Image (tube, coloured by chain):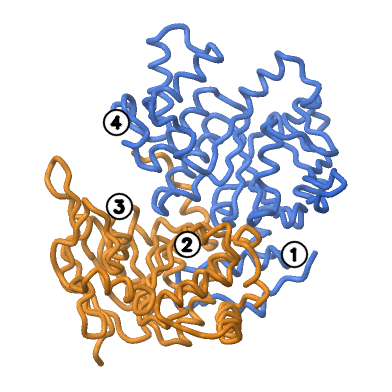
């Protein structure tokens, strides 16, 4: 089957006085229709830079130096800037860690949701908008009444759901979720991730989930890719990678996970330089 | 066991708002909460709960940033509000804090050394610059940092993990009796969390420092604590030894917390939302 997304030899550089910093250094991967890929790595490994590159949101002096990212037959990296504005949200949507802070604090939820869709050419009458907003909020397990609230009246988890509702409002082919729940506590995290899975499944979008929580990856992703220093060190089916991590770095990430099953293993860890 | 505890919260409540004629109904952030830290036997107590459960309010009360609405906080048997000047200074030295954000505590215009020398000078703990330097290097080594790679740098030149370990070193310099750590590892990378928590565990073992570990993460609480207290909406809903809490949780909220932990095993999926929906306490 034809993949939805094909990333080939992606290169993103940031110039420094000591030569270019290769934040993303020749990364290639594919994503099937409706697939959920986990992109794992520590801070600074380049995983968020990939997210920004796919959205074409790399800020200068950072620059996409080479490679391609073919989404449904078109290279995202070659689309003219004006057109890219339409492609964002309509084809590729981004949900970030601080997404809940991207909501405008002085505007109620409904007009913010409508604004996003209007900017992408959707025209409806009032009743049409109302039912569209209702439907989207319901799809992320929020009550339609949330539409009439201001962001500060919502909890972190609710705001993140509003952001997911906006992200899926144009039925994008690809959702890039960059640590969408790392600011939330475990109970809320589970609810938000289950919501994301449900809507993604409903609209048939593919998802790239970026993060460093191996537990979350095991629960959400079907395939995982492990990044280190701008390169992919391991890609594979989630079960294979978790059962038999090939790369020592993947093993290190696995071992660093505290669990409820091995208490003594952790207690032995003392100060290591 | 008639000993006076080092630190004791006795039926402490803290409510916010609700005073004025037009204000919203008051919010009970902490409700009738009691906690004892022994004077002789150091221990790690984990306070576990979600956002809004009152855990940070508790930390602020312990550090004297807030006053309880009712109940008492006692240091060696005396109410914090009645401590004389000298004992208050002793309290401020003996009860130290480590916060969630390893960025916010540093002034980015000063070198890292500043946060380490300031407490030493304030409490006059070093007799000379040489001794000061010696103590600082010792504390940094105790948390696994190399002094030569840490001192003389600016905060932005250190990683989040290094910054947080420097904070642990700072508290160590003061040789406190108790450390109140409010989500000390939630903002640093998974592979570094273990190291920082290992440092805290070591403080108890080697220096006899007690820890009040405030977190929403039951797994790390289980890993390092001697006792877990589960807070839900300002109320203590369950308390016990880590094994007991994790293996035989009695309260529905504790069970929800446990079932929400994402297991690093694709074949042990999260339970469905419906199965664990929580009834109000």
| Quadrant assignment, res A174 | bottom left
- Residue on which the image places disc 3: A44
Q: Judge the density around disc 1: few (<14), some (14-19), many (≥20) Cα neighbours within 10 Å.
A: some
Residue ID for mark 1: B251
Circle 4: is it few (<14), some (14-19), or many (20+) Cα within 10 Å?
Answer: few
Q: Residues within 10 Å of mark 2 (few under 14, many from 20)?
A: many
Q: Nearer the viewer, mark 2 or mark 4?
A: 2
Pointers 1 and 4 in contact (CB under 8 A)?
no
Chain that appears orange: A
Given the image, what chain letter belongs to the residue carrying mark 3? A
Asked which secondary structure carries label 1, the reply is loop
**Residue A242, can we see it?**
no
For the residues beneath circles 2 and 3, the answer to whether they share a chain is yes
Residue found farthest to the front = A125
Q: Position of residue B238 (x, y in %)?
A: 74, 56
Subunit ID for the residue under disc 1: B
Quadrant housing residue B253: bottom right
Badge nearest the viewer, 1 or 4? 4
Asked which secondary structure carries label 4, the reply is helix
Secondary structure under badge 2?
Answer: helix
The quarter of the picture where the C terminus of chain A appears is top left
Q: Are marks 1 and 4 on the same chain?
A: yes
Say the numbered circle drawn on residue A99.
2
Give the residue at mark 4: B149
Would you say B182 lies left or right of A212 here?
Answer: right
């Amino acid at each position: 089957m034809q993949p939805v997304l094909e990333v080939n030899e992606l290169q993103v550089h940031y110039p420094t006085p000591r030569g270019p910093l290769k934040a993303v250094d020749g990364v290639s991967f594919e994503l099937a229709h409706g697939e959920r890929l986990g992109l794992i790595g520590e801070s600074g490994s380049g995983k968020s830079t990939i997210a920004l590159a796919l959205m074409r949101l790399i800020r200068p002096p950072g620059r996409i130096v080479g490679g391609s990212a073919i989404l449904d037959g078109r290279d995202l990296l070659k689309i003219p800037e004006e057109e890219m504005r339409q492609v964002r949200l309509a084809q590729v949507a981004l949900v970030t860690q601080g997404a809940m802070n991207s909501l405008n604090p002085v505007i109620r939820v409904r007009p913010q949701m409508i604004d996003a869709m209007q900017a992408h050419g959707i025209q409806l009458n009032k009743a049409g908008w109302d039912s569209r907003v209702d439907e989207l909020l319901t799809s992320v397990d929020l009550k339609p009444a949330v539409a009439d609230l201001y962001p500060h009246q919502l909890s972190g988890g609710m705001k993140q759901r509003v952001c997911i509702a906006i992200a899926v409002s144009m039925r994008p082919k690809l959702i890039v979720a960059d640590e969408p729940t790392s600011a939330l506590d475990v109970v809320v995290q589970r609810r938000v991730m289950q919501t994301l899975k449900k809507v993604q499944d409903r609209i048939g979008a593919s998802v790239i989930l970026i993060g460093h929580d191996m537990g979350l990856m095991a629960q959400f992703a079907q395939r995982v890719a492990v990044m280190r220093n701008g390169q992919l060190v391991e890609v594979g089916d989630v079960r294979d990678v978790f059962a038999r991590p090939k790369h020592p770095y993947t093993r290190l990430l696995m071992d660093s996970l505290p669990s409820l099953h091995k208490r003594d293993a952790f207690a032995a860890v003392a100060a290591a330089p | 066991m008639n000993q006076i505890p080092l630190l004791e919260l006795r039926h402490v409540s803290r409510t916010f708002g609700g005073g004025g004629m037009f204000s919203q109904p008051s919010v009970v952030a902490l409700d009738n909460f009691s906690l004892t830290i022994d004077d002789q036997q150091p221990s790690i107590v984990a306070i576990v709960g979600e956002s809004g459960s009152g855990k940070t309010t508790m930390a602020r009360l312990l550090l004297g940033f807030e006053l309880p609405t009712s109940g008492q906080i006692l240091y060696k048997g005396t109410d914090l509000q009645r401590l004389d000047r000298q004992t208050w200074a002793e309290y401020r030295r003996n009860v130290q804090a480590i916060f969630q954000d390893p960025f916010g505590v540093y002034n980015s215009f000063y070198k890292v050394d500043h946060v380490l020398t300031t407490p030493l000078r304030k409490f006059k703990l070093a007799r000379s610059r040489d001794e000061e330097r010696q103590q600082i290097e010792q504390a940094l080594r105790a948390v696994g940092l190399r002094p030569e790679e840490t001192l003389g740098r600016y905060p932005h030149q250190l990683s989040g993990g290094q910054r947080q370990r420097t904070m642990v070193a700072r508290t160590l310099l003061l040789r406190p009796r108790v450390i109140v750590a409010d989500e000390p590892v939630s903002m640093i990378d998974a592979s570094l969390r273990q190291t920082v928590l290992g440092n805290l565990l070591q403080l108890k073992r080697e220096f006899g420092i007690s820890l009040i570990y405030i977190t929403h993460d039951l797994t790390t609480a289980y890993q390092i604590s001697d006792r877990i207290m589960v807070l839900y909406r300002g109320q203590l809903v369950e308390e016990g030894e880590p094994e007991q809490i994790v293996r035989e949780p009695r309260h529905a909220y504790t069970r929800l917390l446990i079932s929400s932990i994402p297991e690093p095993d694709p074949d042990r999926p999260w339970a469905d939302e419906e199965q664990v929906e929580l009834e109000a306490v």
